[in-house]
Image (cartoon, rainbow, N blue to C red):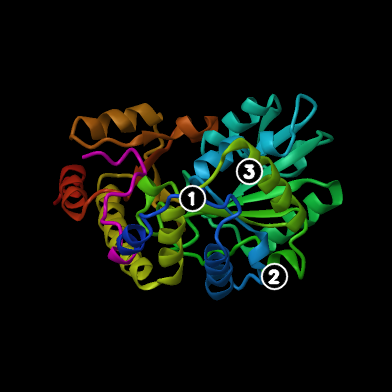
Amino acid sequence: MDLSVGAPVDPTPSVVERALTSASQAPGYPLTRGTPALRHAAAQYMRRRWAADLDPENVLPVIGTKELVAWLPTLLGCGPEDSVAFPELAYPTYEVGALLAGATPVPAPSLTSLGPRRVRLLWVNSPGNPDGRVLPAEHLAKVVAWARERGVVVASDECYLEFGWDAEPVSILHPDVCGDSHEGLLAVHSLSKRSNMAGYRAGFVAGDPGVVAGLHEVRRHAGMVVPAPVQAAMVAALDDGDHVVEQRGRYRSRRELLRAALGEAGFRIEKSQGSLYLWATRDEPAMDSVTWLAQRGVLVAPGDFYGPTGARHIRVSLTATDERVEAAGERISPVR
């Protein structure tokens, strides 16, 4: 029972499939900046779902958000004198992106820990991977104020924003966070988890007009273009909220089952207010927990893969079928 990765396994919504098929006749080159329909759909989604007053001109599609995470420091012109900061428990590609640009990657437990460093780019991730922590609007507003005082670009990885369980996530483009300006801010959104479109490689970045325009200028020369049929499928996914509600229900049921089973096996769930993972510990080295579960046929990820402070935790993914999750629960819990 593989609960070690976050790859979606549920069907891609039929509304998305139909849109892709209907747009498959595409002999011309797609628009790097996205079709007007796509930019409008993304802006409307951000306004409708996250209360972000976003101009469609300040939306840019990306070839899956992992691509953007990896190349954003390079596209922003980060170099050897610059630092790229990110949470101390984090998706490893934040660090890889800094290294690709020749910049210094800095896991930062707090803003004060950055000291006098020349930070060019700061990543925030809420709900977080791996620990599922949800940052409240007040916290994000302080991050934005700190960054604006120093001319730092803040990139908010919001790919799990639709999955808040014990707390309500908020976008960095929400007025309570950024006021009436998106200056210095980028919100990064993926359709992989929200709409089971990981195989489509579909996402978008939105925010600061100048930063988005600069990214477009580089990307159109670098050939970083989302295929036209995928752009059409993205419009259908962003316009439809019903499939998201349905998918959220699937993950909620899996989360409740695994949370109960892990608790019965002596694990304590920490943070995990959102995202598609449970951050669990039995106050033992991560590999001891990984081994104990592997002996029962259940694979999970060791917490230290995401940073040294995760050395006594494991990350348990909810991205498995109902049948596999139920079977994993039976193997984990001694009373089931």
Q: Which mark is residue 220?
A: 3
Q: Earlier in the sequence, mark 1 or mark 2?
A: 1
Q: Residue at x 73, y 64 (%)?
A: 178
Q: Which residues are magenta?
A: 1-15
Q: Residues within 10 Å of mark 1 (few under 14, many from 20)?
A: few
Say what secondary structure mark 2 lies in: helix
**Quadrant assignment, res 255:** bottom left
Classify 320 as above or below 295: below
Q: Report the front residue among 130 and 147.
A: 147
Instruction: Name the spot of residue 234 as percent of width and height, x first.
Output: 44, 60
**Residue 213 in view, yes or no:** yes
Q: Report the front residue among 61 and 50.
A: 61
Q: Residues within 10 Å of mark 2 (few under 14, many from 20)?
A: some
- Verify whether residue 10 appears in magenta: yes
Q: Which mark is residue 308?
A: none
Q: Report the front residue among 322 and 35.
A: 35
Label 2: which residue? 176
Measured Cα–Cα span from mark 1 to mark 3: 15 Å
Q: Which mark is residue 28?
A: 1
- Verify whether residue 96 appears in magenta: no
Say what secondary structure mark 1 lies in: loop
Name the kind of residue labelled 1 in the image.
Answer: Gly
Say what secondary structure mark 3 lies in: helix
Asked if labels 3 and 1 touch by Cβ distance under 8 angstroms, the answer is no
Judge depth for marks 2 and 3 and give the one in front.
3
Instruction: Name the spot of residue 106 as percent of width and height, x first.
Output: 67, 32
Name the kind of residue labelled 3 in the image.
Answer: Arg
Instruction: Name the spot of residue 96 as percent of width and height, x first.
Output: 57, 29
